[in-house]
């Protein structure tokens, strides 16, 4: 269920005023006739909001209205830069704000749902923002030209103002009342800047909310504070399907500050004056669970063994080229390896939370989310109110990495259920998860087992390549089922089905069993698994034949123009990392190259191994993400991606025991710390190609680059993540 | 039970109604509405709740409120005396924050370090900062920002150690 296609715009947008029309259609934004009437009748100091993406007020301030969530990836700043450049606004006049949940902000790559996923925000909204800004600029120019009695064509714009042929100047703010009365020009009539005219795009601009973040401003979901608000925390079922056998309701109720104890589908909620009181109450519940109805409760080892058995037979076909089976069948020594990645947890630093306030005026929902349209629908259906009465207020996300984009909107649904259970109190409810709730709460990056087989020719290069993947799909039976075609979840096989290496005979197939832990996309989705497998396997093939790892990859990429950009980043990374230069004994360099949904990157890791201790000294990344909007922002994402990936490579593992994670907090689920962080160097490739994503693109390479470096240092292969499963530690 | 407690927070004397054992974190966030100090783990494992008590960096999520009575508590809201603290300027110059959630804790840990040791060695920076987790991976920029703040705060005519 989603609200895409609904002709109703949110109340907040309506109140902000605006004139819809042709431009709006460009981005799928529609206003009802009634709404247009309201806007046109607005008084003269009303802001100018020609469409969904921009609002200009009479003081000349420009607000970029952003649909995707800001979770640290810098999308608010980047999209505001795109808008400001095309509008010819002054950067100091520009701010960004979260859009309402509205089809106008739907992501066409995700079925029109308002979803911040798979690093698609810049690729998707780069052009929409430019068109929106160009339309607004054209209207401001028309308004100025009419005032001066000259043709629009003789006017120009710069620094937040329109200039007439005689040098007269009208600031955008002064033109707001006139421009608001105009009809937006059709898309065909818009003139977009030539990239040579860009003044903001391509420059490193500081994050718009940087000061708020450096001064502790309350901008996150968890910081929401409303009069009379109560805080809830839930003693949650350890696994889906478990039932409450018994609990001490009265003990919890007697705990100071506790106002209510209610059963909801996910467990037992304790509602109190503040979080600490709720937590104290929850600890007194002493719940006994009946796990009987929960079905099969597997350990990680059992899941892995079943995956291994499945990998012996072919799964759903994701790609075939040539005659891989024939070629493998007639090869004497098939080179075969298996690469396994465990479940890992997202662990954003801000624990999961949501706040809902229901009044006669509708339902207001505050949270950090990657998936506004579903949240809105879930609140409406859970509370039995119509969609147009639910308003989503997207807060800054204290990290997410996929977790706040759950396809069943778990935290939002649970909060609505708590609210429904205590509706008679008529208070806002804030629901807060603890860190243990987060780490034990299910929804992990899929465990993945990759079985790779190659037939190798006399020259050491593969003639056939067969890749079988076993991983639960986060998409099947979810809101994202449209990403599953012919039984293949595109996000499980990405990077494998589009193997860039020249191998004449190729097969990629996938098993997507539904047992084991519930799974959800985690930053870099299935590419973390496929890239680790492929880049380890290719490294093994190279060393098997006595080839240099960089030269071997180059030989398999060269000659295909589609690989030119990939080849270029490989060369750049190798060069920047001093590939081939001598290293002290016990040190090694490893490489990985991979195309993440259009963004091409290569990484070289340098490690030192002493006994069983591994130290990652340096990681160099060359990356080509097409046109670069904010170079320093891109660089920051690459640095962050490498640190994120190192946590997974060195420590990350959720191990199930009877279906439940053994890990619970950062003592048994460690993350990379400050003192273990390597020197990171980033080489950006200038480009005029359309922009591709950057939030995830540098994650997949780090693990294989590091493990290939360990092999180069001491001749040991790591085929099972994380590092400490291999008798070594970081 | 007498819950009333007088604390000094960011130079102001405040009276809070909090039971013994309630962590300072929740007193700051839920009772005093100072929400710049963040909740991350509740077990003194991630450090995002770091504040100063008598100038020393402590984990407010496990610091019982009664231990703060009569002592000076400083939070991110009180970090800059007037305007921004030099570390906050450095944070902006080097664009440290990504999601930003842990940065209050990072800044308070760094400020406590520089208060007692204006010329820290690299190992001392490691020791002071390795207790604060950042899931976005801003560590390299935190290091750069701290080193640049050290330069900025250095009295004229003195050199690095």
Image (cartoon, coloured by chain):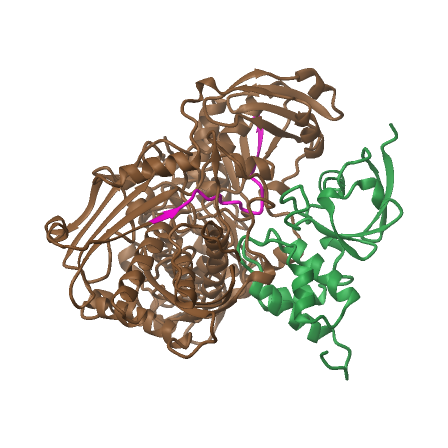
Task: Work out whether residue A217 can be spotted.
Answer: yes
Above/below status of A627 relative to A230? below
Using residue B137 as the reference point, say whether residue A297 is left or right of it. left
Residue A11 in picture, x, y percent from top left: 49, 37
Q: Where is residue A509 in the image (x, y as percent from the top left)?
A: 23, 44
Q: Look at the image and tell me whether residue A163 can be seen.
A: no
Of A520 and B79, the residue lying toward us: A520
Residue at 18% in and 55% down: A333
Q: How many labels does the image show?
A: 0
Q: Is residue B146 above or below residue A8?
A: below
- Check if residue A341 falls in the magenta segment: yes
In the rendered image, residue A510, in percent from the top left (x then y), is placed at 26, 42
**Front-most of residues A216 and A320:** A320
- Which residue reaches farthest bottom? B157
Please state which of residues A1 and A529 is positioned toward the viewer in this rendering: A529
Decide if residue A303 is on the left or right side of residue A724.
left
| Residue at image point 36% right, 50% down | A529
Q: Check residue A678 for magenta coloring.
A: no
Vertical relation: A711 (above or below) A419: below
Chain letter for the brown part: A
Where is the N terminus of chain A found, in terms of image quarters? top left
Specify the segment rendered in magenta: A339-360
Left-right relation of A207 to A530: right
Q: In this view, does B142 lie to the left or right of A540?
A: right
User: What is the x, y in percent for residue B101?
Assistant: 60, 51
In the figure, the shade used to draw chain B is green
Q: Quadrant of residue A621?
A: bottom left
């Amino acid at each position: 269920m989603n609200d895409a296609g609904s002709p109703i715009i949110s109340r907040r947008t309506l109140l902000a005023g605006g004139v819809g029309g042709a431009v709006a259609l460009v981005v799928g934004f529609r206003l009802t006739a009634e709404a247009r009437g309201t806007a046109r009748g607005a008084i003269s100091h009303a802001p100018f909001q020609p469409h969904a993406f921009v609002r200009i007020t009479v003081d000349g301030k420009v607000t970029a209205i952003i649909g995707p969530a800001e979770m640290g990836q810098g999308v608010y700043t980047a999209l505001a830069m795109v808008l400001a450049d095309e509008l010819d606004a002054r950067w100091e006049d520009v701010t960004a704000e979260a859009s309402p949940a509205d089809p106008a902000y739907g992501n066409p790559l995700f079925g029109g749902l308002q979803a911040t996923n798979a690093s698609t925000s810049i690729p998707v909204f780069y052009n929409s923002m430019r068109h929106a800004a160009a339309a607004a600029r054209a209207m401001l120019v028309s308004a100025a030209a009419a005032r001066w009695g000259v043709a629009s064509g003789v006017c120009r714009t710069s620094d937040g103002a329109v200039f007439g042929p005689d040098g007269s100047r009208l600031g955008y703010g002064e033109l707001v009342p006139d421009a608001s009365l105009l009809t937006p020009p059709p898309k065909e009539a818009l003139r977009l800047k030539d990239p040579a005219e860009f003044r903001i795009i391509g420059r490193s601009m500081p994050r718009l909310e940087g000061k708020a973040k450096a001064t502790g401003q309350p901008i996150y979901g968890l910081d929401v504070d409303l009069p009379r608000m109560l805080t809830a925390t839930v003693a949650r079922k350890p696994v889906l399907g478990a039932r409450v056998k018994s609990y001490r309701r009265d003990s919890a109720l007697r705990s100071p500050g506790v106002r209510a104890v209610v059963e909801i589908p996910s467990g037992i909620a304790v509602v109190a004056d503040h979080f600490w009181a709720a937590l104290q109450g929850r600890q007194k519940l002493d719940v006994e669970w009946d796990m009987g109805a929960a079905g099969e409760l597997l350990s990680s080892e059992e899941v892995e063994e079943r995956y291994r058995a499945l990998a012996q037979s072919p799964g759903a076909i994701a790609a075939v080229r040539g005659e891989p089976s024939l070629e493998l069948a007639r090869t004497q020594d098939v080179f075969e390896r298996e690469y396994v990645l465990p479940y890992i947890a997202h662990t954003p630093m801000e624990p999961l939370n949501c706040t809902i306030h229901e009044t006669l005026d509708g339902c207001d929902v505050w949270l950090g989310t990657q998936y506004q349209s579903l949240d809105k629908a879930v609140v409406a259906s859970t509370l039995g109110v119509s969609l147009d009465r639910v308003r989503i207020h997207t807060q800054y996300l204290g990290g997410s990495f996929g977790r706040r984009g759950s396809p069943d909107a778990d935290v939002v649904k649970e909060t609505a259920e708590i609210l429904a259970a205590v509706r008679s109190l008529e208070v806002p409810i804030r629901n807060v998860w603890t860190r243990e709730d987060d780490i034990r709460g299910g929804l992990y990056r899929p465990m993945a087992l990759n079985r790779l087989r190659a037939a190798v020719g006399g020259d050491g290069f593969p003639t056939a390549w067969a890749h079988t993947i076993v991983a639960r799909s986060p998409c099947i039976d979810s809101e994202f089922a449209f990403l599953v075609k012919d039984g293949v979840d595109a996000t499980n096989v990405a990077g494998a089905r589009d193997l860039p290496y020249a191998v004449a005979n190729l097969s990629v197939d996938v098993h997507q069993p539904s047992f084991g832990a519930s799974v959800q996309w985690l930053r870099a989705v299935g590419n973390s698994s496929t890239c680790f497998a492929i880049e380890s396997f290719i490294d093994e093939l190279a060393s098997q034949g006595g080839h240099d790892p960089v030269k071997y990859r180059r030989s398999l990429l060269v000659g295909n123009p589609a690989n030119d950009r990939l080849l270029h980043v490989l060369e750049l990374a190798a060069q920047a990392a001093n590939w081939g230069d001598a290293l002290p004994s016990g040190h090694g360099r490893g490489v990985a190259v991979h195309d993440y949904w259009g963004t091409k990157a290569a990484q070289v890791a340098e490690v030192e191994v002493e006994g069983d201790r591994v130290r990652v000294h340096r990681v160099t990344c060359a990356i080509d993400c097409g046109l670069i909007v904010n170079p320093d922002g891109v660089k920051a994402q690459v640095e962050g991606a490498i640190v994120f990936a190192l946590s997974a490579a060195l420590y990350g593992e959720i191990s199930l025991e009877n279906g439940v994670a053994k890990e619970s907090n950062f003592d048994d689920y460690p993350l990379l710390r400050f003192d273990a962080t390597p020197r990171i160097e980033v080489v950006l490739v200038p480009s005029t190609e359309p922009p591709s994503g950057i939030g995830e693109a540098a994650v997949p390479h780090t693990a294989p680059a590091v493990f290939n470096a360990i092999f180069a240092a001491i001749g040991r292969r790591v085929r099972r993540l994380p590092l400490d499963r291999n008798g070594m530690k970081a | 039970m007498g819950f009333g407690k007088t604390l000094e927070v960011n130079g102001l004397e405040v009276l809070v109604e909090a039971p013994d054992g309630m962590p300072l974190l929740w007193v700051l966030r839920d009772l005093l509405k100072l929400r710049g100090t963040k909740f991350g783990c509740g077990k003194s494992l991630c450090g995002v709740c770091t504040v100063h008590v008598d100038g020393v960096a402590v984990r407010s999520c496990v610091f019982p409120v009664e231990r703060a009575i009569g002592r000076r508590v400083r939070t991110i809201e009180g970090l800059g005396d007037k305007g921004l603290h030099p570390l906050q300027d450095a944070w902006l110059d080097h664009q440290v924050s990504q999601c930003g959630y842990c940065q209050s804790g990072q800044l308070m840990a760094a400020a406590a370090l520089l208060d007692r040791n204006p010329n820290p060695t690299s190992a001392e920076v490691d020791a002071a900062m390795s207790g604060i987790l950042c899931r976005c991976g801003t560590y390299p920029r935190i290091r750069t920002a701290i080193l640049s703040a050290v330069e900025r705060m250095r009295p004229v005519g003195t050199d690095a150690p």
